[in-house]
Image (tube, rainbow, N blue to C red):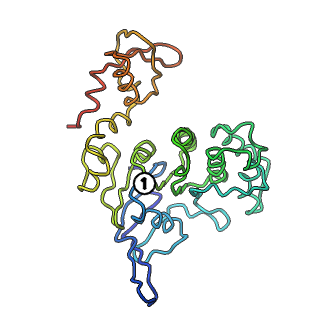
């Protein structure tokens, strides 16, 4: 694990009823501990009401912990917080253009400069928003508005980006595209990201570490591969879905990683295609092997046998 930038130590949170009739104290989190390494993408996964959003708020400082502590390696100055925050609702200012929305943090801090606009325009390019800088929120789709909110959160290069179900309100096609854009930005800048989700596929697709939470307790903190192959509790196993395990393992691999020498007939697939999609194409087209292209050239083939081996339970 790389250098830790977030250390969550035995964090608990209890909401006190305050003596109100017919109300009891509620424990949302209990002794949660884990560390987030620099540049990691961590998915906080669990059902609604399990405590994951409460944990994200405690990490950000928006909510105090009842017990335990959160240590942040880079606290930043008083005027530059260490976090960017993206909510499920994009929360854009309707009277400002997309570009001005993204530049708003600099105005709050009173130090907007031309270099800041250049950086934000680069983020617009990575988020596939070029040409929409002067558009108002009402002129943007839901996915585009959420990408603008991500650009805004990253505009001043926070070392840590916190995201509370940012794609939950998007339809599947737009959601997948927004996820791709987020991964591209994260790889470009090496930002540490902690994301809340209740979607196992999203947690696996985005996170290189997954924290499974239920009923306020951390059940498992591990890589997607270990979560799938070695679930720590029956709840984690049920969350994965026994019948979906092979396909979830395939989703972690690109076809280019399984390329071998040889020819194959029929349409080729890009090397960045997931092994899961390559497996589906083999079954759908009735082929035992698919040609793989990278940079416009055929680099080999991926076989149904290799895909089946990758989908098998790790030793």
| Residue that appears at 77% across and 62% down | 110
| Residue that appears at 46% across and 44% down | 206
Can you say whether 142 is above or below 303 in the image? below
Can you say whether 28 is above or below 180 in the image? below
Residue 181 on image: x %, y % = 57, 40
Front-most of residues 119 and 300: 300
**Label 1 environment density (alpha carbons within 10 Å; few <14, some 14–19, many ≥20):** many
Residue 303 on image: x %, y % = 32, 19
Front-most of residues 168 and 9: 168
| Extreme residue toward the front, this view | 22
The residue beneath circle 1 is 198
The picture quadrant where one finds residue 302 is top left
| Residue that appears at 43% across and 17% down | 292
Residue 299 on image: x %, y % = 43, 15
Can you say whether 258 is above or below 1 in the image? above
Residue 296 on image: x %, y % = 53, 15
The picture quadrant where one finds residue 285 is top left
| Extreme residue toward the left, this view | 315
**Residue 116 appears in the picture as rendered:** no
Front-most of residues 151 and 268: 268
**Residue 194 appears in the picture as rendered:** yes
Q: Relative to 233, is 12 on the left or the right?
A: right
Task: Quarter of the image for the C terminus: give it.
Answer: top left
What is the total number of numbered labels drawn onto the structure image? Answer: 1
Numbered disc 1: secondary structure: loop
């Amino acid at each position: 694990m790389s250098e830790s930038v977030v250390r969550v130590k035995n964090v608990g949170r209890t909401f006190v009823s305050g003596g109100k009739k017919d109300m009891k104290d509620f424990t949302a989190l209990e002794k949660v501990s884990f560390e987030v390494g620099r540049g990691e993408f961590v998915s906080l996964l669990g059902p609604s009401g399990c405590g994951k959003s409460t944990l994200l708020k405690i990490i950000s400082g928006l909510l105090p912990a009842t017990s335990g502590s959160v240590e942040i390696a880079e606290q930043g100055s008083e005027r530059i917080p260490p976090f960017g925050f993206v909510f499920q609702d994009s929360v854009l200012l309707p009277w400002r253009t997309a570009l001005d929305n993204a530049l708003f943090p600099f105005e709050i801090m009173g130090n907007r400069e031309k270099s800041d606009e250049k950086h934000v325009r680069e983020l617009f390019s990575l988020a596939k928003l070029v040409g929409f800088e002067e558009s108002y929120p009402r002129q943007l789709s839901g996915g585009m508005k959420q990408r603008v909110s991500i650009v805004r959160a990253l505009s001043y290069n926070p070392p840590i980006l916190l995201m509370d179900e940012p794609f939950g309100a998007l339809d599947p096609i737009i959601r997948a595209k927004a996820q791709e854009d987020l991964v591209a930005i994260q790889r470009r800048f090496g930002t540490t990201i902690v994301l809340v989700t209740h979607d196992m596929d999203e947690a696996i697709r985005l996170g290189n570490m997954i924290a499974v939470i239920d009923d306020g307790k951390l059940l498992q903190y591990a890589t997607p591969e270990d979560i799938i192959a070695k679930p720590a509790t029956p709840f984690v196993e049920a969350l994965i879905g026994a019948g979906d395990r092979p396909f979830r393992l395939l989703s972690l691999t690109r076809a280019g990683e399984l390329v071998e020498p040889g020819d194959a007939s029929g349409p080729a697939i890009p090397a960045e295609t997931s092994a899961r999609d390559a497996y589906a194409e083999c079954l759908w087209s009735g082929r035992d092997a698919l040609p793989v292209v990278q940079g416009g050239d055929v680099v080999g083939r991926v076989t149904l046998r290799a895909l089946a081996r990758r989908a098998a339970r790790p030793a």
